[in-house]
Amino acid sequence: MAPPSSRRSGFSKKAQFSLFTSYLLAGAGALLGLALLALSLRQPAAFAPLRGLAGDAVAPAGEAAATVRTGQQSLFSGIAGYLRAGSQNAALREEVELARIRLAEAEAVKAENRRLKALLGLQDKAVKPVVVARLVGSTATSGRRFAFLGAGSSAGVRPGMPVLSERGVIGRVLETGRTSARVLLLTDSESVLPVRSAKGNVVAFAEGRGDGMLRVRLVNLGINPLKPGDLMVTNGAGGYYRPGVAVAVITETTPDGGIARLVAEPSATNYVAVEPVYQSEAIAALRARRAANGEAERAEASGGRAPSAAQGSSSPTTAGASEGGAE
Amino acid sequence: MERLNPHARADRYGSRINRTQSPICAGSVPYLSIMLGSLLPALLIADVMPLLPSLGLLMLLAWRLVRPGLLPLWVGAPLGAFDDLFSGQPFGSAMLLWSLALISLELVEARFPWRGFWQDWFTAGLIAVLVWLGGLMLSGAPVTREMLLVALPQALLAVLLYPIVARMVAALDRFRLARARRIG
């Protein structure tokens, strides 16, 4: 099809100018995009409020879609169970699978208890979730793996909080809107989670590979003690996740660790729980100290009398850190 | 006249007597459909790999190729900004890539004024694949072999989906220009 003849400018000055202006505007749009892109690559949180608003707007639609999705899932699993040995079979199998995970977790807890025997009196209280909500969507067109959660800051969700399903870790809250939040899934290639194996005391980092698997990297290199089938659980380092929650199962070993499959697949979950940050005081203290250090550096750079002020602000943070450590 | 030919006073958009096109509908349907294309994939749960190509981009390319001259040249920036809110890419990446896509389409059209469906498909497929690659590069995470591997089906789907999206856009265009408003 030939373009409409009106779009050829010919000798008309007006048409020439309007064509020129449209090119100019399009080029300006591209440049604006480039500038915003550079800004958001440098400061990923710069557009969080805007994305939060957008997420709030589509959360209800996502809620409806999630209802349909879970309905479909139970329908499919019901049909599958009936075809095999009745729908009970499917439920039982799921229960056994859960029990197996719980058993491995219990082993992890046992190992932890042995380790902490020396530190009597330090016991964790049962963690109450901040909110239980649905995953209402995800970024299905991007190479990054984010999910949208159907609860936001109005329900008490804050950035950094861990998101868990009944099987294990899903990810971590990255940004919050009022009624929605953005979750960084474990499979994202920017996600790193400190883990240890459920049986031994092998400490490692689980990094997302971007293709649905996790790469487990051992902290202490040497003989690789991991075997396929080993369950990796969170080890509580970093202070965001409580220790002993199932993360992934090793499927193959590599010289520096292994490749692991997720235990809790976000697409197979119905509801997820957002838990409070495990060591919130310690993390707050760390942040405050970092901010104070930054302030002090800035003040020194500008030649002010900031060191005393920085010290004044850092003394309560050390108190906070010791408090967090004692809990 | 009606006895001879029942469609004598109608065109493909409906009866011409007492009916006219709604300017709101005619003006808004392209934009709304592109924005809906940006929104819909966000309702899927993709935990392992990207599931769909950017439907918003495919709609934009289809509107631009099926109905040249309807969308202004600069429309890539605002529609891309809307897409960035939901796509998970860093804000500004679709603004940049969609603007570049529209500018390059304009240049292609100036060079080849007479085009057919196959050439449109080729152009749209090429641009969709280039934008897909650009999106991966600008996603804010380093591009790994695994990431590229699981995203490949996305590029293939983008090329294969274009004819379907183009037919959808043609149907939407008929809907957009339907004579639905009653005069007097």
Image (cartoon, rainbow, N blue to C red):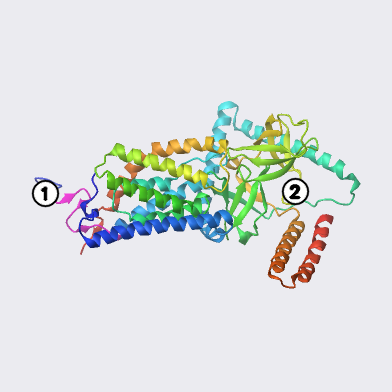
User: What kind of element bears circle 1?
Assistant: loop
What's the CA distance linking mark 2 and mark 1? 79 Å
- Total of numbered circles in the picture? 2
Q: Estimate the x, y position of residue A164 in percent, counting from the top left.
A: 67, 47
Q: Estimate the x, y position of residue A63 in percent, counting from the top left.
A: 53, 51
Outermost residue toward the bottom? A305
Left or right of A131, for residue A220: right
Residue A148 in the magenta stretch? The answer is no
Residue B16 in the magenta stretch? The answer is yes
Q: Residue at x 58, y 31 (%)?
A: A81
* Between A20 and B25, the one nearer to me in the picture: A20
Of tags 2 and 1, which is closer to the observer? 2
Q: Which segment is the magenta one?
A: B8-23
Which residue matches tag 1?
Answer: B2
Q: Estimate the x, y position of residue B12 in percent, counting from the top left.
A: 21, 48
Question: Can residue A141 be seen here?
Answer: no
Which chain does the residue under circle 2 lie in?
A
Residue type highlighted by circle 1: Glu
Question: Can residue A268 be seen here?
Answer: yes
Tell me whether the residue at label 2 lies in contact with that at label 1, contact meaning CB atoms closer than 8 angstroms.
no
Q: Residue at x 56, y 36 (%)?
A: B145
User: What kind of element bears circle 2?
Assistant: loop
* Between B91 and A199, the one nearer to me in the picture: B91
Q: Residues within 10 Å of mark 2 (few under 14, many from 20)?
A: many
* Between A66 and B32, the one nearer to me in the picture: B32
Q: Residue at x 39, y 43 (%)?
A: B127
Q: Residue at x 55, y 43 (%)?
A: A70
Outermost residue toward the top? A84
* Residue A242: image tag: 2
Which chain does the residue under circle 1 lie in?
B
Q: Is residue A274 above or below residue B123?
A: below
